[in-house]
Amino acid sequence: MKISHLFFRSIAVAALAALSALFLVACSDPASGDDTGKYTITIVAVDATGVERLDANQTQATEGEAITLTATLGPNRKVGINIPGITVTSAVITTSGGTSTFIMPATNVVITAKFF
């Protein structure tokens, strides 16, 4: 009888721990920024060669800040910039050192930079 009681008690503790973990995950909001009200800016480079890259003037920003993106390109190369749901000025940069800008929303941002 004691083994059975310990078994069920162990199951109950494990179930409670699992529910607690699910609650914490469900309550966390990845778009909510950190305690300072800043949201992250992440750049994902696709098909970049050599020294090619797209850099943001900051990695975190508050809502409403102007963010500048600067491209480093190889000869005769371009980069297309896509940020779902956000208007980007100069969505294609055609010169190395060329820039593009957007206004930071109240959410974390993932920028796709497609080099071609």
Image: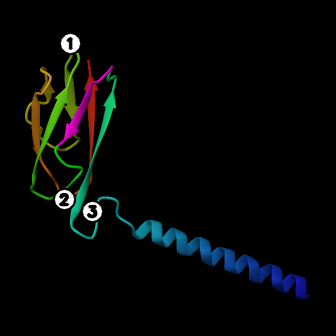
Q: Nearer the viewer, residue 46 or 55?
A: 55
* Disc nearer the start of the sequence (1/2): 1
Amino acid on which disc 3 is placed: Gly
How crowded pointer 1 is (Cα within 10 Å; few <14, some 14-19, many 20+) is rated as few
* Disc number lying in front (1 or 2): 1
Q: Which residue is painted at 21% across and 66% down in the image?
A: 37
Instruction: State the image coordinates of residue 17 (x, y, percent, origin top left).
Output: 61, 75
Seen in the picture, residue 31 relative to 5 is either above or below; the reply is above
Element assignment for label 3: loop
Report which quarter residue 60 is drawn in.
Answer: bottom left
Q: Which residue is mark 3?
A: 33
Q: Which residue is painted at 89% across and 83% down in the image?
A: 3
Amino acid on which disc 1 is placed: Pro
Instruction: State the image coordinates of residue 74 (x, y, percent, origin top left).
Output: 23, 17
Residue lying furthest top in this view?
76
The magenta stretch is 50-56
C-alpha span from label 3 to label 2? 8 Å
Q: Which residue is mark 2?
A: 106
How crowded pointer 2 is (Cα within 10 Å; few <14, some 14-19, many 20+) is rated as some
Q: Nearer the viewer, residue 46 or 15?
A: 46
Q: Nearer the viewer, residue 78 or 15?
A: 78
Seen in the picture, residue 80 relative to 18 is either above or below; the reply is above
Report which quarter residue 33 is drawn in.
Answer: bottom left
* Disc nearer the start of the sequence (3/2): 3
* Colour logic: rainbow
Element assignment for label 1: loop
Instruction: State the image coordinates of residue 78 (x, y, percent, origin top left).
Output: 19, 19
Q: Are marks 3 and 2 in contact (CB under 8 Å)?
A: yes
Report which quarter residue 89 is drawn in.
Answer: top left
